[in-house]
Amino acid sequence: MGVELMIYMYGAVCAAMIIFNIVYNFISKSQRLRLNRRAKKLTDRIKPQLERLKDGKRLEQEHLDWLFKKLKRIGWLLALESVLDSAWLEDSELYELREHIDSYLIAIQPVMLYLAGEYIDSKPLHSGYFTYFLSKHGVPRQNEIESLQGLLLEYLKKENFYCRVNSLKALYRFASAENVVRAILTQDDGRVFLHEKILTEGLLSFTGNHDELIKGLWRSFERLSERSQLAVLNYIRFKSPDFKEQMYGIMQDKSRPKELRLSAVRYLGKYSYAPALEPLIAMLGDKDLENWEYATVAASSLAGYSGLSVIEALKDALFSGNWYIRLASASSLERLGVEYADVIDIMSGSDRYAREMMSYRLETRKLQRAGVE
């Protein structure tokens, strides 16, 4: 009886899975058909408007009124995204008019502003998708749409990870340095965690003046959390060589968190700064094993400097008991162009680990050169 019951239960589970798959496929197909019908209606309505823009005319008010009515529903917004994406495909009805898409997006900004007010109190999924749409199809460098950007700053206050990330992406796209600074301060409330890499990559995608944005972020630097400060320092390292003195100050400030100081060390490795040379050498020579991260990053950064003192400091670090310090030192010596003759004392020395590490880096460089040739 027990075996029969298990067979019946197994059959019931299989039947339930079959029914689920049938229903799921039916619903998915129905949704795809509905999306395609809406996309076709949008295409039929957008094409004449693109032709008007091509002829130097404005959009018809009737078209804007229709968008006001339809795009309040998330399904129509999904369809609009589909139409805009497909406009760049050769088989699209809008392909010949694709160069006027940006002009169309500028013309419907009043609709986007209206929708921003509609979706802000909508379901989290809908709010997140609306900000995603703006991050993808918002018109770059449109600083005059201040009301829309103001609403995006309100979206940033929502406890929804995707809503926050997409709102930031949209603001990076709109290119207002002032509003991006306000956004970075707003998202820093600690209610939703955004990794510093997300913030750094977002700042790098900013379409406006990076120097202006960096200056604004630096003015607000002390108001930010450690996580956001680290993102800002990393962003500055990628975009500006003009903060050597400030980075030197952070590197030397032992009251600063470790990650901030390490970021400053990396900056001073990318952009050499004469006053930083001796502190970097001292950092590399620190024998306290708890400070191995500082020594490792200092070793990598010294590749941006030159001189006998740098070479000797890196050679001494090859005898460190920490593998990462030895690797970083050997890599920097290789980048500085040392040859076997320059490190003959190490290659013929008794420390097998230092000898093998240096030999590995020099052989790697030889193979790379051979590959290029």
Image (cartoon, grey):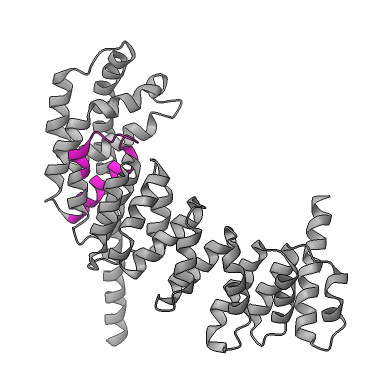
Magenta segment main secondary structure: helix
Res 40 visible: no
User: Is 148 a magenta residue?
Assistant: yes
Q: Quadrant of residue 97?
A: top left
Residue 180, given in percent of the width and then of the height, sits at 30, 49
Horizontally, residue 6 falls left or right of residue 322, namely: left
Horizontally, residue 164 falls left or right of residue 94, namely: left
Q: Quadrant of residue 311?
A: bottom right
Q: Quadrant of residue 138?
A: top left
From this view, report whether residue 85 is shown above or below residue 212: above
From this view, report whether residue 365 is shown above or below residue 312: above
Which residue occupies the foreground of this view, 18 or 192?
192
For the record, the magenta segment spans: 124-149
The quarter in which the N terminus is drawn is bottom left
Residue 32, given in percent of the width and then of the height, sits at 29, 41
Which residue occupies the foreground of this view, 8 or 162?
162
From this view, report whether residue 29 is shown above or below residue 237: above
Which residue occupies the foreground of this view, 233 or 29?
233
Identify which residue is drawn at 46% across, 60% down.
234
Horizontally, residue 62 falls left or right of residue 246, namely: left
Residue 274, given in percent of the width and then of the height, sits at 60, 63
Horizontally, residue 101 falls left or right of residue 58, namely: right
Identify which residue is drawn at 45% across, 55% down.
236
User: Is 207 a magenta residue?
Assistant: no
Res 247 visible: yes
**Outermost residue toward the top in this view:** 55
Identify which residue is drawn at 25% across, 47% down.
131
Q: How many marks?
A: 0
Identify which residue is drawn at 72% across, 63% down.
335
Residue 231, given in percent of the width and then of the height, sits at 40, 61
